Image (tube, rainbow, N blue to C red):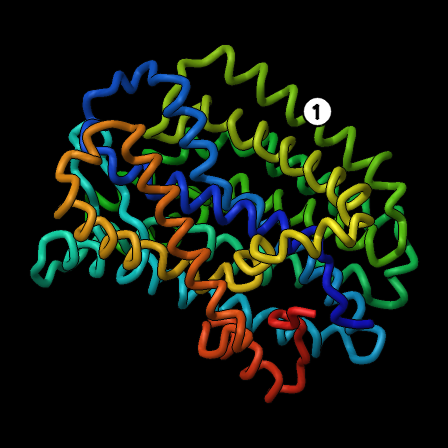
Amino acid sequence: MINKRIASLDAIRGLSLMFILLFHCSIYNFANIHKLDFSNPPILIILMSFMALWGGVFIIYSLTVNSLMFLRRSEIETPAKTYRYLLLAGLIYLVLHYVLNIFLGRWNIDFVNNQPHLTFIAGTLRNLSLTMPPVTKLFEGSSLSTIALNLIIVSGLLVLLTRNQGLQKSTRNYLILGISGFIILVGSFLRVSFYPVFSGAIESGDFLTSIGLSFLIANPYPLLPYLSYGLFGAMIGMMIYSDRKDLLKKIILPLGVFFFVFGIYGMMNFDKTISKPDYFWYFKTNFELGVFLLLAVLILTSLEKRTRFLKSISLINCFGRISLTIYLLETPVSEILRIFLHLFLPDWDQTINGCLMFGLFNIFIWALILCFWRKNNFKYSLEYFWVLGFRKLGKGSTKLDMH
């Protein structure tokens, strides 16, 4: 079946989104975050920062699923036609990236000076007056922009790899994807040296250069190193398509262990930071990829077989099914809840524990919304219109198939 879903990946995507909700709502509402020692922040804050930046899971997930879809659809139509769907999806994600960064998305914080850089909705709700975001919001990266460019670039590479019966050259394909991903990730330390060029372009008003470099090296999800996440995701998708899950243990597992150990070793030798692109964050991205690859092996070789368990966590799957809608609306919902909570508990945001409770409260509210919304299969969600639009173009989807 061309569009057969991978239930375990839906579950992990939903769980990851719940973690993101928890830690976005916690970190970015902590009123005293500027009082922390950012040269050596508390381990709890470091862990929360890791969990808040789990967009890498979505990059790997998206490229795994879309690469698998690409290969399956290529059996009944030309790879070029299939690529057009993914190219269009990538362009839509790029548009949504700017919608998120300028209007709907979470805010960034100058942690040292405790100055929040608010989006339009967040600023307007927080100040209770129309508040335009700073122009620098144009130059911030996001998981959506990185997923978009991964879809465009990696899918284009798959078109080349599948030409002239190229899919049969599996060893060559794994080597190209794996070596490319490895080189990009390990070599992404160059981002640390290039970042001042990006900062200088913004300061000098060179907006064209700033926008270009925003995709390549800007916080929080630059192509260096996150293009490698997409390449490894495509590699996993190709293994699933070829029914070679044994290669997950033979290839992906050792890679996961390597990046995990390499990342841990590097992070132990640099000062812990959470506010700037430096070598600590370089090793952090290696560590995270290792975690995500090991997680992929675990869920695809073990969790996928546990169908009864997967059905029992259907609410978590709901978070995964409309993750894009929730991701775009998490900040407006959080800001509205923040206003009401301050009426009853004015000091809730003075401690990190209070902010963590606020994060859990946001998850609870979204769970209630999903319990009612799924009764009509999430009609009028962004995913609903996504499926509707692509069906009219001739591409079927099981994105909202809850059965």
Residue at x 41% of width, y 32% of height: 49
Q: Is residue 152 left or right of residue 51?
A: right
Q: Residue furthest bottom?
A: 392
Residue at x 26% of width, y 16% of height: 37
Asked if 18 appears above or below 37 in the picture, the reply is below
**Can you give x and y, in whole percent of width and height, for residue 378 in the image?**
50, 73
Label 1 element class: helix
Q: Is residue 246 left or right of residue 186?
A: right
Q: Is residue 43 left or right of residue 123?
A: right
Q: Nearer the viewer, residue 139 or 18?
A: 18
Residue 249 in view in this figure: yes
Residue at x 40% of width, y 42% of height: 22
**Can you give x and y, in whole percent of width and height, for residue 186 in the image?**
61, 30
Q: Please rate how many residues cluster around mark 1, counting C-alpha atoms within 10 Å: few if below 14, some from 14 to 19, many from 20.
A: some
Asked if 336 appears above or below 396 in the picture, the reply is above
Q: Is residue 170 left or right of residue 222?
A: right
Amino acid tagged 1? Phe
- The residue under label 1 is 258
Residue 193 in view in this figure: no
